[in-house]
Image: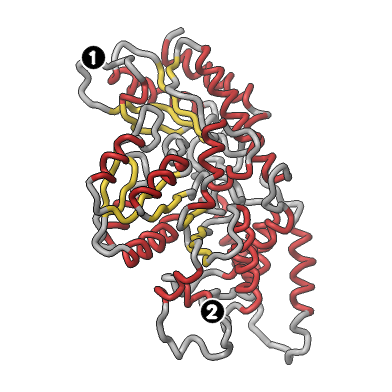
């Protein structure tokens, strides 16, 4: 099941890469002990059995999407040189490829001028965005929704920034009336709009946030680590489409190519609309920058050493699958959302389950009906285990009880949250496998619910 037909392509590419250095004197390196390496890799393969099958459509749990074959091959190819994209000395070609790939991501959001680079993932990317926000508006508050990724409050603590949470509406989006009331009290420097929460895939009301900026004058940071690529999808709901259409007007954006961008971990990206932000990164390191007067990526990044292989993989993937609407890549995102909508429709018609709202992207949350909230939470975990025994791997999530409406509002439950089931249908193949997924879920539910 694991694709390996492309390994010959890697061997051919390695020969071509080697030919580019043919003018060098012969290198008499010690021959690797291939027998021992083979045995160790076989042992590693056996250890890796202890994983969920993240690459398979029956894995419908967390945000884990297999990298595209071209990304795997390009990353592996670059490892024979192992460039470091901190300074041009360490990654001349891969630094140029990073600039090109990042510029294509910025163009996807409608930015010609920008400042940006790759980093280890969304956490580091958001750290840089909030670091810049804190330096531009020192002492002012950072506002995030209750469903924003926890990294924002954690990062704010690291940066010694004051971060406040704004309540969410019943669909997991930042409540715009609560935001308006908080802005009216003043002292706000940045509002973080989450374009696809990790729990439910909810999209904060960016259009409304942009309108409020005209009155209150804050910065807007779009945390699009998960949902950013859906800007290209052609089948978003009208209001979600409207919010994504205004992402061009924010001040900074984070997106994770190692999620929907088909890249190996870790590959995040941070973008700033104003290239002058680069002045905040200015520093002196004569031991690092000596071979070129061109801008080194390390001069606009908080991270120092960064894998050039990640840039090569992203560059290669975007050559094969350009970031354009109605293209092959965009259509694959549409299939993910179509699968989520179809799954939600089946859940909504089945009286064994409660599903609070239709997905905005490709994440669905649902819970078994029960006499009370605690019983539903217990049943969620039982169904999770029963489905896993049948090779269908879901996820569980703790969500506010309010997301499920009035179902348990009158009950004296022990907690205000519910443990529910969650599926991330982020593989285009999920649409083709939906009947199989539903059949297994039905079997697991019958076992746990007794009907």
- Residue pictured at 51% horizontal, 29% vertical: 359
Label 2 crowd (10 A; few <14 / some 14-19 / many >=20): many
Classify mark 1: helix, strand or loop.
loop
Q: Quadrant of residue 199?
A: top left
Which of 179/153 is in front?
179
Q: Which numbered disc flags the more N-terminal residue, 2 or 1?
A: 2
**Observer able to see residue 33:** no
Residue 93's disc is none
Q: Name the residue beneath numbered marker 1.
A: 411
- Gap in Å between the C-alphas at discs 2 and 1? 60 Å
Q: Is residue 397 left or right of residue 388?
A: left
- Residue pictured at 35% horizontal, 35% vertical: 175
Q: In this view, does 315 lie to the left or right of 188?
A: right
Where 277 falls versus 177 (above or below)?
A: below
Q: Name the residue beneath numbered marker 2.
A: 296
Classify mark 2: helix, strand or loop.
loop
- Residue pictured at 52% horizontal, 48% vertical: 247
- Residue pictured at 54% horizontal, 52% vertical: 248
Which of 47/80 is in front?
80
Q: Residue furthest top?
A: 451
Percent of width and height locating residue 147: 36, 39
Q: In which quarter of the image is residue 180?
A: top left
Percent of width and height locating residue 333: 63, 40
**Observer able to see residue 429:** yes
Percent of width and height locating residue 84: 55, 75
Q: In which quarter of the image is residue 383?
A: top left
């Amino acid at each position: 099941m694991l694709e390996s037909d492309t390994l010959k392509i890697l061997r051919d590419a390695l020969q071509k890469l080697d030919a580019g250095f043919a003018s060098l004197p012969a290198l008499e390196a010690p021959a690797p002990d291939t027998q021992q390496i083979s045995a160790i890799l076989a042992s590693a393969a056996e250890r890796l059995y202890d994983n969920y099958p993240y690459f398979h459509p029956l894995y419908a749990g967390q945000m884990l999407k297999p990298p595209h074959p071209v990304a795997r091959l390009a990353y592996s190819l670059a490892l024979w040189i192992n460039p470091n994209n901190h300074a041009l000395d360490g990654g001349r070609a891969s630094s140029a490829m990073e600039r090109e790939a990042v510029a294509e991501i910025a163009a996807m959001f409608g930015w010609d001028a920008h400042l940006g680079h790759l980093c280890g993932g969304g956490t580091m990317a958001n750290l840089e965005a909030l670091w810049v926000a804190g330096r531009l508006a020192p002492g002012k508050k950072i506002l995030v929704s209750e469903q924003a990724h926890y990294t924002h409050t954690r990062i704010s603590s690291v940066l010694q920034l004051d971060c406040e949470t704004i309540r969410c509406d019943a669909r997991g989006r930042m409540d715009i009336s609560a935001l308006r009331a908080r802005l009216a009290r003043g002292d706000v420097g940045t509002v973080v709009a989450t374009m696809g929460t990790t729990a439910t895939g909810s999209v904060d009301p960016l259009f409304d946030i942009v309108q409020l900026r005209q009155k209150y004058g804050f910065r807007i940071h779009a945390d699009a680590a998960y949902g950013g690529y859906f800007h290209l999808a052609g089948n978003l709901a009208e209001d979600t489409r409207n919010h994504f259409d205004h992402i061009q007007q924010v001040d900074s954006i984070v997106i994770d190519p190692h999620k929907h961008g088909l890249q190996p971990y870790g590959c995040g990206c941070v973008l700033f609309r104003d290239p002058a932000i680069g002045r905040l990164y200015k520093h002196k390191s004569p031991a690092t920058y000596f071979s070129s007067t061109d801008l080194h990526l390390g001069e606009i990044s908080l991270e120092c050493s960064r894998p050039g292989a990640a840039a090569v993989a992203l560059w290669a993937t975007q050559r094969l699958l350009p970031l354009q609407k109605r293209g092959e890549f965009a259509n694959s995102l549409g299939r993910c959302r179509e699968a989520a909508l179809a799954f939600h429709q089946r859940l909504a018609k089945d009286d064994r389950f409660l599903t609070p709202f239709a997905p905005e992207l490709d994440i669905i949350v649902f819970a078994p009906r029960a006499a009370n909230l605690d019983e539903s939470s217990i049943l969620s975990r039982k169904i999770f285990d029963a489905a896993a025994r049948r090779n269908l791997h879901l996820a569980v999530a703790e969500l506010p009880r309010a997301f499920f409406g009035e179902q348990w509002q009158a009950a004296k439950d022990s907690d205000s949250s519910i443990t529910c089931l969650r599926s991330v249908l982020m593989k285009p193949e999920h649409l083709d496998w939906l009947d199989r997924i539903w059949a297994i879920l039905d079997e697991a539910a019958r076992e746990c619910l007794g009907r």
